[in-house]
Image (cartoon, rainbow, N blue to C red):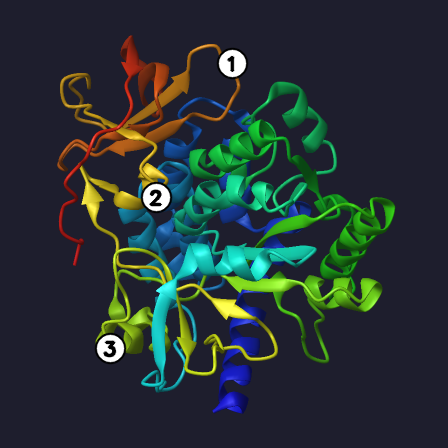
């Protein structure tokens, strides 16, 4: 079983890192990435909507060409996530999996395991660690919500730095000066959920740092990106003996061992420093639009009623935690199936700290998709929105989820603003009844 799991893991890594490599090497990127990257670089307020619509229009071309279909649907899911549309992200991800080899793993026996709360368990496991690594699947915001909800807890444990894959070497100084992520800093931080994690880290007093080489400098040799990332983190820890670092990375750069072709960042860090990082996989054990695309361990956990209303990890009687990647990852978080609050995922309330803002009385009439964004009053003009969403003409109007404060709410078509700005003061959240899961 372990050999089969390892082979499956390496296969998944090879597929995902191939896409990540394309995204990093923008000068050699194919047309789906060029299209999305150019749109987001223009930094129009409605850029995520434009990027998503353009990728959707390119679907048939990518399928006909064959070569870039997998990448297009990966990017389409990413664009939907940046736009705040979790449902459309899952739909695009399902199309992505149609162009991938089998990836869900073999049958898993979890009868010896029981569920324990993930957040408190991961925090307790982190208490004596100098380095903790969390990962995300770029196609969804779910893991970013986990980071935003826990970042202040990590700071209280003594973690001093949040090291993020998505930032360039120039971004941390800009983010620190502005007190928030901007549309011009980072890539995945254009998602308001990840931007909120950055804002909370800064407010708590953590240093937000980059560690990856800038994409233009990544060499052609396999593993250059991970090698230099691991060495960058090793240098940070050497230069600041008091530093404790929470690393937030994409996919399986956090794996602690690799193979003959690829040695991941976490393995490099361990070689250079002797530090054993706690590696926490947030990306694999979660829902997909189609159950057939979900990992077999996730489906097994659901059959045994181990999934509840909050993220969990699975422990056996000896206190060992389940991982489908032994020797690679220390522990995996199993996320519950999503329920919806006024059309938005329940986990967007970020631990009950954000309130629902009903857009039905505010939205202008339109036969086109509308993009809505809420910006904090007083924030820098190019700050990432506090929340944003898409209003599709034939779908119920979604809500926004916002922390207490005053906001500017604006609506856009792909061509520009529509209607008038709305100023909205948001009070502390009250109880909201979640709708049933979308399945």
Look at 73% across and 32% down and name the residue there.
Answer: 170
Look at 49% across and 84% down and name the residue there.
Answer: 5
Indicate the position of residue 388 as horizontal and vertical percent values: 35, 29
Task: State if disc 3 and disc 2 touch (CB < 8 Å).
Answer: no
Which quarter shows the C terminus? bottom left
Q: Earlier in the sequence, mark 2 or mark 3?
A: 2
Q: Kindly identify which residue carries mark 2.
A: 57
The local crowd at label 1, few if under 14, some if 14 to 19, many if 20 or more residues have their Cα within 10 Å, is few
Frontmost of labels 2 and 1 is 1
Q: CA distance from mark 2 to mark 1?
A: 30 Å
Q: Kindly identify which residue carries mark 3.
A: 304
Count of numbered tags: 3
Frontmost of labels 1 and 3 is 3
Q: Earlier in the sequence, mark 2 or mark 1?
A: 2
Closer to the camera in the image, 38 or 140: 140
Q: CA distance from mark 2 to mark 3?
A: 41 Å
Query: Which secondary structure, mark 3?
Result: loop
Position of residue 168 in the picture relative to residue 11 (left or right): right
Whether residue 95 is situated above or below residue 154 in the rendered picture: below
Task: State if disc 1 and disc 2 touch (CB < 8 Å).
Answer: no
Query: Which secondary structure, mark 1?
Result: loop
Indicate the position of residue 6 as horizontal and vertical percent values: 55, 83
The local crowd at label 3, few if under 14, some if 14 to 19, many if 20 or more residues have their Cα within 10 Å, is few
Q: Earlier in the sequence, mark 1 or mark 3?
A: 3
Q: Kindly identify which residue carries mark 1.
A: 381
Position of residue 329 in the picture relative to residue 423 (left or right): right
Residue 98: quarter of image: bottom left
Look at 35% across and 62% down and name the residue there.
Answer: 286
Q: CA distance from mark 1 to mark 3?
A: 49 Å
Q: Is residue 282 visible?
A: no
């Amino acid at each position: 079983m372990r050999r089969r799991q390892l082979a499956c893991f390496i296969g998944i890594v090879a597929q995902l890192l191939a896409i990540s490599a394309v995204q990093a090497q923008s000068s050699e990127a194919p047309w789906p990435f060029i299209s999305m990257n150019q749109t987001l670089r223009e930094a129009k307020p409605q850029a995520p909507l434009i990027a998503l619509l353009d990728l959707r229009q390119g679907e048939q071309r990518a399928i006909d060409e064959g070569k870039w279909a997998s990448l297009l649907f990966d990017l389409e899911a990413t664009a939907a996530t940046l736009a705040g549309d979790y449902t459309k992200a899952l739909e695009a991800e399902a199309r992505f999996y149609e162009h991938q080899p089998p990836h869900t793993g073999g049958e898993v026996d979890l009868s010896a395991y029981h569920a324990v709360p993930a957040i408190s368990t991961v925090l307790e496991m982190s208490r004596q660690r100098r380095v903790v690594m969390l990962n995300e699947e770029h196609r969804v915001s779910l893991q970013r919500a986990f980071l935003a909800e826990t970042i202040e807890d990590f700071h209280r444990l003594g973690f001093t730095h949040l090291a993020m894959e998505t930032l360039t070497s120039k971004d941390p100084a800009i983010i620190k000066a502005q007190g928030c992520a901007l549309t011009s800093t980072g890539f995945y931080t254009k998602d308001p959920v990840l931007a909120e994690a950055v804002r909370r880290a800064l407010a708590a007093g953590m240093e937000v740092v980059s560690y990856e080489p800038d994409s233009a400098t990544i060499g052609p040799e396999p593993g250059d990106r991970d090698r230099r990332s691991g060495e960058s983190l090793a240098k940070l820890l050497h230069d600041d003996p008091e530093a404790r670092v929470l690393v937030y990375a994409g996919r399986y750069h956090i794996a602690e061992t690799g193979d003959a072709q690829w040695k991941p960042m976490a393995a490099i860090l361990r070689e250079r420093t002797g530090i054993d990082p706690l590696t926490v996989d947030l990306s694999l054990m979660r829902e997909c639009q189609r159950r057939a695309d979900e990992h077999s361990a996730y489906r097994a956990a659901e059959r045994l009623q181990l999934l509840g209303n909050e993220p969990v990890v699975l422990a056996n009687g000896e206190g060992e935690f389940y991982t489908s990647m032994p020797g690679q990852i220390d522990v995996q978080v199993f996320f519950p199936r999503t329920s919806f609050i006024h059309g938005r995922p329940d986990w967007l309330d970020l631990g009950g700290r954000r309130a629902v803002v009903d857009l039905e009385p505010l939205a202008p009439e339109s036969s086109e998709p509308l993009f809505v964004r809420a910006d904090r009053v007083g924030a820098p003009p190019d700050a990432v929105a506090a929340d944003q969403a898409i209003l599709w003409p034939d779908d119920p109007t979604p809500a926004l989820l916002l922390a207490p404060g005053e906001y500017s709410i604006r609506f856009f078509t792909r061509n520009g603003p529509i209607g008038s700005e709305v100023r909205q003061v948001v009070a502390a959240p009250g109880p909201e009844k979640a709708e049933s899961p979308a399945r």
